Amino acid sequence: MLAVQLARLQFAATMCFHFIFPPVSIGLGWLVCVADWLAWRRRDPVYEQIGRLFGKLFAITFVVGIVSGVVMLFQLGTNWSRYSRFVANVSGAPLAVEGFFAFFLESTFMGIYLFGRDRVSRRLHWTSLFIVTLAATTISAFPIIAANSWLQTPAGHVIRDGQAELVNLREAIINPSTMPRYGHVITAALLMGAFIFAGVGAWHVLRDSRSLLGRKALRMGVFTGLAVSVLVIVPFGHIHAQQVARTQPEKLAAMEGLLTSQTRAPLMLFAIPVPGPTPVLKAKIEVPGLLSYMAFGDVNARVQGVEEFPPHERPPLLPTFLSFHAMIALGNFFLALMALSAFRLVTGKIHGDRWLLRTLVWAVPLPMVAIQLGWMTAEVGRQPWIVYKLLRTVDGASPAVSAPQVRFSLVLLGATCAVLFASWLFLMIRTATATPAPATAPRRAPAEAVPASHLA
């Protein structure tokens, strides 16, 4: 049992570490695409500066993300062999698709983007970035989320000889939780990118209030962040929560701290859960009937509580409840911060509001904290199942791997991840805070004439 617990800890730690980089890559990739497009089509030297600066941040994150992702795949074969055997026929297809997008397209077009600036045409250079962002990050995230969603809501399979066998590829990939989770994850990643743009722009404005790079990056980050902070809550977060209510009722009960089944179930705004044989909630602040309405569209709908499920099938209440409510609190904070920042931008007062600018700088890592909390809610709330209702986590571990072996690899991987994270953080901060090179008009291919309207 100790080996299983250590294997769970190891996979959770490496997953949390890896999950830092894909959201940053997706969010930065799309915003850098916009900046490079504006630099190219408008011949705007400031957007050229922005594209170069944030393109470096994107490239640094992209490379570390690939390295950190490979480690997780090895763990599945070493520490979780029975799980790997059980899901191999189902997860093989989406993982192969992800490998095609992530490695073949990345190796080609990321090379053009990194080394082709000022060597190839602007059209080809921008197209390479667009393909990397669309295919190698955004689209390649879909099969990964689909494979993980199958663990949450299995579909399109039969069980033969103790293994899940794929019988309907479409049902397995587009299972009940795939699309709600994909929309929620992608909008969260865009929010992460927006906060990086806003925070880095705010830092440059704090250093020099006349910095055009800082002002334009700040504007891009704030207005993108405002739009996405709404979308990540409504519709995508709301749709995802409704899906959990329909397909994983015990997870919803733990997330919301609903101990007993009831109609007109209240939405818990705040509570202190006290775990034990009979868990209780103290200092509750709740809105009667709101959970029933939000989950099922009917204020009188019955919502199942934790006590309705057998004790051996209940997810851990404390971590599920706290991670979910902390994520919700951060989401509301993001919306309020971006709304205030947008208002100050429109009124032209944000560049002199040093308190707000400092808040934007220090808030940069908070979307990543919220993303990690969301992952904890999803994965811890699925327990004790590694494949929901089909395979328990304890039954998916490798029987031949001992606790000392897992402990040794845990220490080794922990040290490696710590070095990688420190290196990534150092490079990101040094690159983001460096004095930008003087703005010059971006080079254009002779055939790419500039419309007169763009020069006016």
Image (cartoon, rainbow, N blue to C red):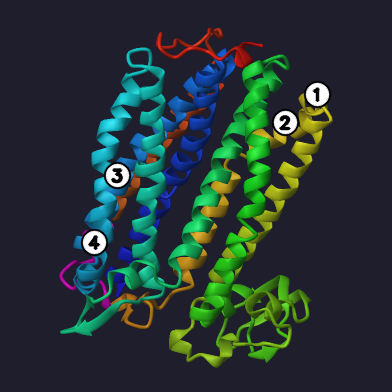
For the residues labelled 4 and 1, the Cα–Cα distance comes to: 53 Å
Q: Nearer the viewer, mark 3 or mark 2?
A: 3
Check the picture and name the quadrant holding the C terminus. top right
| Magenta span | 395-408
Please, what is the three-letter code of the amino acid marked with disc 2? Leu
Q: Nearer the viewer, mark 4 or mark 1?
A: 4
**Numbered tag placed on residue 93 in the rendering:** 4
| Label 4, residues with CA under 10 Å away: few <14, some 14-19, many ≥20 | some
Using the rendered view, name the quadrant where residue 344 is placed.
top right
Kind of residue sitting beneath label 3: Ala
Residue type, numbered disc 1:
Gly
Q: Quickly name the residue at label 3.
A: 102
Residue underneath mark 1: 352
Q: Going by the image, does 343 lie left or right of 202?
A: right
Q: Which residue is painted at 54% across and 68% down in the image? A: 319
Question: First in sequence: mark 2 or mark 4?
Answer: 4
User: Disc 2 marks which residue?
Assistant: 357
Q: Quick one: 60 or 447, which is closer to the camera?
A: 447
**Is any atom of residue 408 visible in this view?**
no
